[in-house]
Amino acid sequence: MIKKALLVYGKMPDPIHQKTVRDVKRFLQENEVFYSTKERSGVCIPSCKGYDLVIVVGGDGTFLRAANGIRDKTPLFGINSNPKKKEGFFMLATKDDFQEKWRSMLDGDFKIRKLARLEAILNGKTLDDLALNEFYVGYRDTTLVARYELKMRGKKEVQRSSGILVGTASGSYGWIKSAGGVQLPLGSRKFQVVVREPINARTAKATITQAVLNPTESIMITSLMRNGVIIVDGQTKDIAFDEGNVLTIRVSSRSVSVIVL
C-alpha cells in the first residue's frame, strides 16, 4: 500500500517532458495517491525520508539526484519522460506505459533490486554524497593533466592522467564502460577503478590503469594538484580536492532499492 509518495522531476523546456510530468500528476490524483513534489535541484539527503515510494520523472540524471537523497530502504520507481532524448537506464517505465506498470506494481508483480553505492572519506571525514554510478577525481577541465598518488592492494604509485573513475556495477554500464572498464552484473557489490588516458613519462608511470575490487577493499588517492575536484555521479557541484588532500573510496553499507518488473 502506497500511502505517501514523493514525485521528483526536473524543470526542463522539453514539452514532451513537461506533458509527462502533468500526466503522472493527474494519474496519481485520479488514483487517490497522496504525493508531494520536489524539483531535482532541491533534493537533499533528508528530503526523501518518510515516503513509501519515490517516483522519478525524467532521465538518469534526475534518477541519480533522487537516489542520492535516500538513505533508507525507500524504493524508486523511474519513468522516462522522453525516451527519444533520454537513455533511461534506471527507468522502469516510459511516458507511454507507466500506468500499466504502476498497476502491475500494485498487484505485487514486481521485485526490489538493491544497487550498491560507494562512499568517500575526505581527510578523515565521510562525505554526505553517495555514488550510485561513480566518483570522478581530477580536474573539472579535463584538458588539464591530473596528478595524484594512487594506493590500492598494498601498492602505490604517482600517476598523471585525465583523471580517475571509481564506479559501481551500475556505473559500469555508462561512463566507465566508455572509458575502458568492464561491465559488472547489476547486483554485484564489486567496484572498479579506471584511469583515464594515463600518461607514461619520466616523472610518472601508470601500471595500475584498471582493476575490479572486492566489496571489502578500498582505494586511496592523494592529491598532487591545485584546484582538483571530486565529482559525484556527474553532478554540477564540485568537491575541492587540493594538494595534500587524501581521499578513500569504498563500498557503502547503504545500497539503494529500485523497483523492477
Image: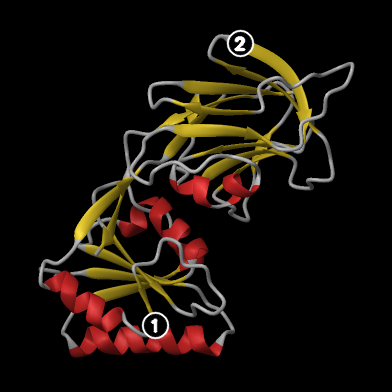
* Image quadrant containing the N terminus: bottom left
| Residue 157 image-quadrant placement | top right
Q: Position of residue 210 (x, y in %)?
A: 61, 30
Q: Nearer the viewer, residue 235 or 157?
A: 157
What amino acid does circle 2 point to? Lys
Can you identify the residue that label 2 sits on? Answer: 155
Residue 85 at x, y percent in the picture: 57, 77
In the image, 68: left or right of 151?
A: left
| Earlier sequence position, callout 1 versus callout 2 | 1
Residue 47 falls in image quadrant: bottom left
What is the secondary structure assignment of the residue under circle 2?
strand
> Extreme top residue here?
154
Q: Which residue is mark 1?
A: 95
Residue at 79%, 27% in the rendered image: 160
- Rendered image coloring scheme: secondary structure
Residue situated in front as seen by the camera: 218 or 240: 218
Q: Residues within 10 Å of mark 1 (few under 14, many from 20)?
A: many
